[in-house]
Image: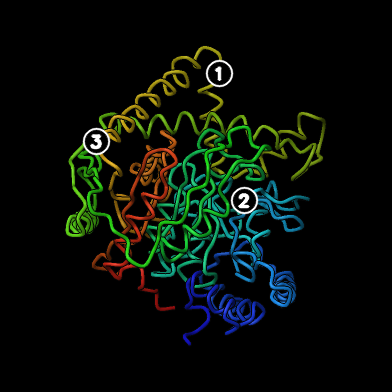
């Protein structure tokens, strides 16, 4: 049997179900690896080893009890999992990577987290994130930078960089992330793992501390499409506590032993292969598309003509929603409270000291876009163009079953590489933002490596609520290639 930390989600569950390993042994193995390597990576903000081991002990006792009675074992019973620190886990602090929530301990679980706890997962801790999920590098965290396991001088991507690094470094077989503008897919690409951004409304946002309410989605990162699908399906489904939650039925699993994709049509948008893209990234994605053709898929060139407007549209809508969502952090009800002067000083000093530079920048951008005299010119116009971007996808999906594209223009960049240039950082999201604006699902997975040994990811985007098509295509690719089997040498 291989090292326990080398096991995928599927392999962990098989070992647990066959009695080859206990949940306590499995959890201890991951905690030992975290203890040895976490100082190099800083993938976590908060670790909960005692809680994890107690949960693992309870899981082993529950398994023995249910087995003796001949009753059904919960699907993920005893499986360790890492959780991004923007999702509420009762009794464990949820900082959102911000000083303003440094001491916030939620009394309840996010719905996505609760569903996985019900399925038997063991929470290892809360992973690092750009503050309030605003960033593409995990450099904006108030608790320090996460390092890329493939090259410690580089970023892991963001904002789910801690979760991606944890999955790639085998700190956990899987991790939860969130994707508002690419925050699952871009870190998955940079760290060489697989990650899903579901259809908007497919997974409940209840208990996800909001950034952009019309864009936020809860996703999963793991090493294979099959693993991601398993956890995604258990999180998905209607939740009456989330007004944007969809009651569309959760589909059956499609990742099988021999996945056939013959006849599926894959669109290749010309707008995603632009001047400035790293040549090795384009070459790897085009080679991956060639693999699909060899597997029997039909490749179709398509156009998504409003793609060029996605970046400015996103950076009007998302900051506007952030400005509204973050108004609640006022030093009065919860979070950091700086009592130094009158009521106005309380507001100003609590927010001034609690928020980092990038969050302040986006609050100001959003407040300006929503202000009297500018609302129609900026926010209103952006919403109109968002409708056009969604219409582009709707039209494309009358011709194809999925769309293939790069995840990011480059591989992982150096820590500090974008310095004080926020626009350069925003450009990292140029290929991921359109899916969030349109609300369609996107799945990122490894498709190669560049000359420096850094992972290259590609993404597939699908029709609303057709995640199974993306899982089927990604699983077929991973059956035919071995990129996802490579691991960083830590």
Which one is earlier in the sequence, the residue at label 2 or at label 1? 2
Rendered residue at 36%/50% (across/down): 470
- Locate the C terminus and report the quarter of the image it occupies: bottom left
Is 486 rendered above or below residue 131?
A: below
Nearest to N terminus: mark 3 or mark 2: 2
**Vertical relation: 49 (above or below) 1:** above
Which of 252 and 352 lies nearest the eye of the viewer? 252
Q: Which residue is drawn at 52% across and 44% down?
A: 134
Callout 2: few (<14), some (14-19), or many (20+) C-alpha neighbours within 10 Å?
many
Q: Where is residue 96 in the image (x, y as percent from the top left)?
A: 62, 50
- Please identify the quarter of the rendering in which residue 29 is found: bottom right
In this view, the mark in front (2 or 1): 2
Label 3 belongs to which residue?
Answer: 399
Residue that mark 2 sits on: 112
Q: Name, please, the residue furthest toward the front.
A: 70
> Which mark sits nearer the N-terminus, 3 or 1?
1
Residue at which label 1 appears = 371
């Amino acid at each position: 049997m291989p090292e326990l930390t080398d096991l995928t989600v599927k392999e962990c569950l098989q070992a647990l179900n066959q009695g080859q390993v206990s949940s306590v042994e499995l959890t201890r193995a991951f905690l030992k690896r975290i203890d040895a390597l976490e100082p190099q990576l800083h993938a976590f903000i908060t670790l909960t080893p005692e809680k994890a081991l107690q949960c693992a002990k309870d899981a082993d006792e529950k398994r023995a009890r249910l087995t003796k009675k001949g009753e059904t074992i919960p699907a993920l019973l005893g499986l360790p999992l890492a959780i991004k620190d923007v999702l509420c886990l009762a009794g464990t602090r949820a900082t959102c990577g911000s000083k303003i929530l440094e001491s916030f301990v939620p009394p309840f679980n996010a719905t996505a987290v609760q569903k996985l706890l019900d399925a038997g997962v063991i929470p290892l801790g809360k992973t690092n994130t750009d503050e309030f999920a605003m960033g593409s590098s995990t450099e904006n965290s108030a608790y320090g930078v996460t390092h890329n396991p493939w090259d410690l001088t580089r970023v892991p991507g963001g904002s789910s960089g801690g979760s991606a690094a944890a999955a790639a470094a085998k700190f956990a077989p899987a991790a939860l992330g969130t994707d508002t503008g690419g925050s699952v897919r871009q870190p998955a690409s940079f760290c060489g793992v697989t990650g899903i951004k579901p259809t908007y409304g497919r997974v409940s946002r209840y208990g996800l501390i909001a950034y952009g309410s019309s864009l936020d989605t809860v996703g999963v990162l793991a090493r294979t499409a099959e693993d991601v699908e398993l956890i995604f399906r258990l999180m998905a489904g209607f939740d009456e506590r989330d007004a944007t939650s969809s009651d569309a039925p959760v589909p059956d699993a499609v990742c099988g032993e021999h996945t056939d994709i013959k006849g599926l049509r894959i669109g290749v948008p010309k707008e995603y292969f632009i001047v400035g893209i790293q040549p090795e990234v384009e070459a790897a994605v085009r080679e991956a598309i060639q693999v699909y053709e060899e597997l029997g898929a039909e490749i179709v060139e398509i156009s998504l003509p409003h793609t060029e407007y996605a970046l400015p549209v996103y950076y009007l809508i998302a900051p506007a929603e952030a400005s509204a969502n973050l108004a609640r952090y006022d030093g009065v009800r919860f979070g950091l409270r700086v009592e130094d002067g009158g009521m106005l000083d309380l507001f100003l000093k609590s927010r001034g000291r609690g928020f980092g530079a990038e969050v302040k920048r986006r609050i100001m951008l959003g407040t300006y876009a929503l202000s009297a005299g500018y609302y129609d010119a900026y926010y209103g116009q952006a919403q109109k163009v968002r409708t056009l971007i969604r219409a582009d996808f709707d039209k494309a999906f009358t011709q194809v079953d999925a769309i293939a594209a790069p995840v990011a223009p480059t591989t992982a960049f150096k820590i500090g590489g974008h310095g004080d240039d926020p626009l350069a950082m925003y450009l990292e999201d140029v290929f991921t933002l359109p899916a969030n604006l349109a609300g369609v699902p996107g799945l990122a997975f490894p498709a190669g490596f560049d000359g420096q040994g850094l992972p290259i990811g590609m993404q597939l985007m699908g029709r609303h609520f057709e995640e199974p098509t993306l899982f089927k295509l990604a699983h077929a690719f991973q059956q035919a290639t071995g990129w996802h089997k490579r691991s960083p040498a830590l």
